[in-house]
Image (spheres, rainbow, N blue to C red):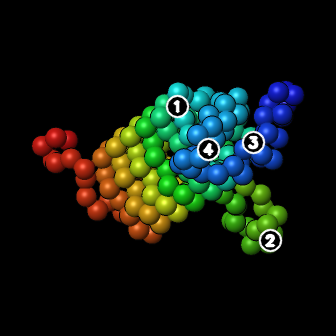
């Protein structure tokens, strides 16, 4: 690991992560500070990204985040994740890219390790509600809204509005004619 990347990780996890939320009107400098640090950690970081207070993203080396997108307060994401442009993420969202193996019963699950990581792709113009969980290998298409507390277990079609556990499409943002 390069020394500059190491210093950015230290700066983020020891200092910037604990600064107040970026909507704090008395601390206008907070958003640019976290943005500057994160841009040097992510595989790709677009313009005007927002990393909120308490966000965890590992070392960020496999994360791509598009213009005007953000990682919400206390969110936990790591692994190969692609976040498109104009993506909103509420507080406490979790995006997973790996899961434990559990097939063998002669070995405790804790000793079986992990499956091969499965990347997550989030397209442009997506809104992910508070405390939602996105499981490994899921692709979320353009214009999707994920209701708060939902657990997304499979790919989501364009302009769907979904919620629940497991998340199910309840309606679409556009009519059948527009599709």
Is 124 on the left-hand or right-hand side of 89? left
Is 61 on the left-hand or right-hand side of 72? right
Whichever of labels 1 and 3 marks the residue nearer the N terminus, that label is 3
Whichever of labels 4 and 2 marks the residue nearer the N terminus, that label is 4
Whichever of labels 3 and 2 marks the residue nearer the N terminus, that label is 3
Determine the image quadrant of residue 33. top right
Residue 40 in the image, given as x and y percentages of width and height: 70, 29
Report the residue at 54% width, 47% height from top: 25
Judging from the image, what secondary structure is the residue with disc 1 in? loop
Residue topped by disc 3: 12
Q: Quadrant of the C terminus?
A: top left
Q: Quadrant of the N terminus?
A: top right
Whichever of labels 4 and 3 marks the residue nearer the N terminus, that label is 3
Mark closer to the observer (1, 2): 1
Residue topped by disc 2: 108
The Cα atoms of the two marked residues, 3 and 2, are separated by 36 Å
Residue 160 in the image, given as x and y percentages of width and height: 31, 52
Residue topped by disc 1: 48
Residue 154 appears in the picture as rendered: no
**Residue 27 circle label:** 4
The Cα atoms of the two marked residues, 1 and 3, are separated by 18 Å
Judging from the image, what secondary structure is the residue with disc 2 in? loop
Cβ atoms at labels 1 and 2 below 8 Å apart? no
Q: Nearer the viewer, residue 122 or 3?
A: 3
Tag 4: Cα neighbours inside 10 Å, few (<14), some, or many (≥20)? few
């Amino acid at each position: 690991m390069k020394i500059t990347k190491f210093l950015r990780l230290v700066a983020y996890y020891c200092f910037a992560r604990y600064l107040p939320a970026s909507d704090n009107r008395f601390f206008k400098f907070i958003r640019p500070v976290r943005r500057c640090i994160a841009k040097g950690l992510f595989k790709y970081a677009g313009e005007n990204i927002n990393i909120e207070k308490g966000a965890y993203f590992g070392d960020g080396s496999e994360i791509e985040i598009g213009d005007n997108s953000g990682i919400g307060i206390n969110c936990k994401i790591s692994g190969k994740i692609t976040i498109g442009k104009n993506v909103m993420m509420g507080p406490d969202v979790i995006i997973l890219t790996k899961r434990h193996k559990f097939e063998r019963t002669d070995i405790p699950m804790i000793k079986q390790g992990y499956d091969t990581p499965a990347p997550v792709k989030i397209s442009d113009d997506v809104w992910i509600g508070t405390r939602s969980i996105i499981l490994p290998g899921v692709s979320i298409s353009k214009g999707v809204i994920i209701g708060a507390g939902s657990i997304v277990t499979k790919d989501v079609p364009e302009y769907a509005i979904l919620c629940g556990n497991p998340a199910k499409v309840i309606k679409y943002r556009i009519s059948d004619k527009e599709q």
